[in-house]
Image (cartoon, coloured by chain):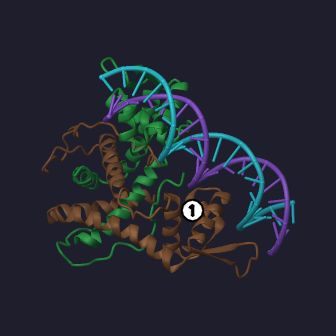
Chain colours: A brown, B green, C purple, D cyan
Amino acid sequence: MSYANDMTDRQSPPVTGTPAASDGPGPVDHEAPVLAAELRLSLMRAVRRIRAEKADLDLSDGQLSVLAVLHARGALTNRELADFEHVRPPSMTRTVACLEERGLVERAGHPQDGRQVLVSATEAGRAMALDTRRRREAWLARQLEQLDPAERELLARAGTVLRRIADA
Amino acid sequence: MSYANDMTDRQSPPVTGTPAASDGPGPVDHEAPVLAAELRLSLMRAVRRIRAEKADLDLSDGQLSVLAVLHARGALTNRELADFEHVRPPSMTRTVACLEERGLVERAGHPQDGRQVLVSATEAGRAMALDTRRRREAWLARQLEQLDPAERELLARAGTVLRRIADA
DNA sequence: TATTGTTATACTCTATAACTATA
DNA sequence: TATAGTTATAGAGTATAACAATA
């Protein structure tokens, strides 16, 4: 698995660069390049930790991801799923076949286009997708509960900024 | 590849829950469970986007991760590398052998313990690890430059909180 | 005897190429 | 003819089991 290059490095704490508006409770650098280096590592580590929380059902990452996509967006064709997961159609065919065997997804012909196949999550599939998501949210919520309210507010606002960046 | 279950879901914007200290520029919820749900998705999406930036050298995620670890922490034994990457020793043997063939790492006997093998990155290996890291930092820095200073400061502080959470 | 590393072997996931069916 | 899906086959990556060398 190797959960993708974490690029673990720079175990040293944040370094104060240009002393801009340094009024907060710690030395933080707001210059883009230095902040980028620190932030990238913080984000990757946090996500790595969140990802470690998963249901102990033996579903591969790809299978779990497909279930989550179907759970969120409803029925999709094999091609749409493949594009969404950045995987080739034959690979998705196999993944979907595996999920179907386990009763986690269903295949149905497309009403208009006879070539296409609509894949949708079954109730069991949706439950499984929800289970892992809830475990991760629960872990994160436990961590957030240990912060003070100002820190939670800080993270809430940071989240909206991060989403804007990621969706750019 | 499938870059691990993104658990893409809930495309709706943040929902205001308990109206705590809602003085900021947007509706944000500071209650732990709701914040956890929103933040998890924001973090995963941001990291997914950052990960998309990588050197186009054909190195697998696992190989790249090993190079990054060696670059950050110096020489490590096969066992240490395997534990660090959450992979079994035979798998790491194979990964290291592949990197060695390409001149990116070197193997040397352990000075004290004749059983162990010390793996270290070569200059080429370090350069390759740096390259991907710099691409990701550069992409993130470009995004950060488009924010206003207050938002950068926000992210800088959020980063320190996230690191504290992840390392807990 | 326990531990480190390796080799042998098998399984999973993904890819490309070729084939079928439909538009 | 172009496209959606599948099948056949091969290539990475990882796992377990068995073996060699050292502590």
Q: Which residue is mark 1?
A: A84
Q: Residue at x 55, y 39 (%)?
A: B56
With A90 as the anchor, is B142 left or right in this view?
left
Q: Which percent across, then down, holds residue A58? A: 47, 61
With A33 as the anchor, is B135 left or right in this view?
right
Read off the chain for label 1: A
Front one among A59 and C23 = A59
Q: Specify the quadrant that holds the C terminus of chain A.
A: bottom left
Front one among A151 and A76 = A76
Which residue is at the far top?
A: B111
Residue B38 visible in the shown view = no
With B21 as the anchor, is A101 left or right in this view?
right
Residue A150 visible in the shown view = yes
Instruction: Give the amino acid type for the residue marked by disc 1 in the picture.
Output: Phe
Q: Residue at x 14, y 51 (%)?
A: A24
Q: Which percent across, then down, holds residue A129? A: 45, 70
Q: Residue at x 56, y 74 (%)?
A: A103
Count of picture labels: 1
Residue C9 drawn above or below residue A23: above
With A70 as the anchor, is A39 left or right in this view?
left
Front one among A154 and B132 = B132
